[in-house]
DNA sequence: CTGCATCCAGGGAGATACTG
DNA sequence: CAGTATCTCCCTGGATGCAG
């Protein structure tokens, strides 16, 4: 019943990695936070997260959508209108983010430089 | 007093990024978990985290040490003996890791593939 | 407006060989 | 035993330009 075998370790680690992956990279966290203020359109996010590039913004949004933390809604109009919105599953991430923030603040106090 | 300015956002984001950085990469999380079972020597970790390379293990351990989540103790002996050990600050990370794991498990249920 | 195609630079991390 | 040196590969993500 050891918890120290490779397999058992991985079983514990994999969900953590999943979570880290959803938040990983330079932009996903910022994106999530901006979307937590309300739905956003593509160009609005591009402005708010400047200097993000269109290509990167597009890719990051797709990733978040694939992970079901945001939804993408296309409205039939010209010029095109697309709205991004956080899901309940996405909202549930903020509890975790808040914990990370708390630890990070304690960490900063301890390290005292940077 | 808006919480939506770029500066205010960053203030919230930076500690979160700090935390993510400490855990980031392929190995640091595994390293931390193995060290949570007790102190470890270099070659022991190398075996447990196989197929990690010496170079990478060395670098990751330095990073964790710089972030004060582990300590490195060198014993005066031949051949050399070095022991790595988690610090209280490192221990405090496990609460956060556990939260990440919980969210990750819920996430996995929702996604249902991979 | 929204977003894809192409090209490219920089950093993370592996392989291998070597040292106090 | 516990690392360091060097070289290399690859992936993430940036720059630019084009399309529906």
Image (cartoon, coloured by chain):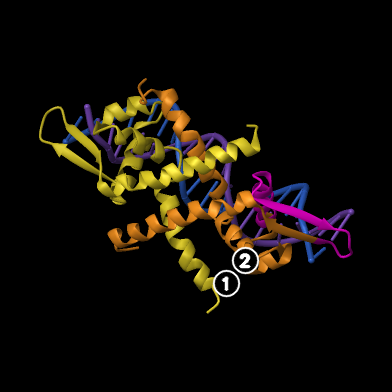
Chain colours: A orange, B yellow, C blue, D purple
Query: What residue is shown at x 64% (from left), y 49% (from top)?
Result: A64
Say which quadrant the C terminus of chain B sits in. top right
Return the x and y of residue C9 as percentages of the image width and height: 56, 53
The residue positioned farthest toward the left in the image shown: B76
Q: Which mark is residue B4?
A: 1
The chain ID associated with circle 2 is A
Element assignment for label 2? loop
* Residue A33 lies in the magenta-colored region: no
Query: What residue is shown at x 50% (from left), y 72% (from top)?
Result: B8
The residue positioned farthest toward the top in the image shown: A1
Query: What residue is shown at x 62% (from left), y 66% (from top)?
Result: A37
Indicate whether A39 appears above or below B87.
below
Return the x and y of residue A107 as percentages of the image width and height: 33, 57
Query: Which of these two is toward me, B92 or B9?
Result: B92
Magenta span of residues: A56-81
Quadrant of residue B41 in the image? Answer: top left
Mark 2 nearby-residue class (10 Å; few <14, some 14–19, many ≥20): few
Q: For residue A23, say whether it is visible.
A: yes
Name the residue that disc number 2 marks.
Answer: A37
Please state if B13 lies on the left or on the right of B111 as rendered: left
């Amino acid at each position: 019943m050891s918890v120290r075998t490779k397999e058992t370790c991985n079983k514990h680690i994999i969900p953590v990695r999943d979570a880290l992956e959803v938040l990983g990279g330079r932009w996903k966290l910022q994106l999530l936070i901006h979307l937590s203020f309300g739905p956003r359109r593509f160009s609005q996010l591009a402005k708010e997260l400047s200097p993000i590039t269109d290509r990167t913004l597009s890719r990051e949004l797709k990733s978040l959508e694939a992970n079901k933390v945001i939804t993408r809604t296309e409205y039939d109009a010209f010029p095109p209108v697309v709205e991004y919105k956080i899901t309940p599953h996405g909202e549930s991430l903020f509890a975790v983010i808040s914990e990370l923030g708390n630890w990070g603040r304690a960490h900063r106090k301890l390290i005292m430089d940077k």
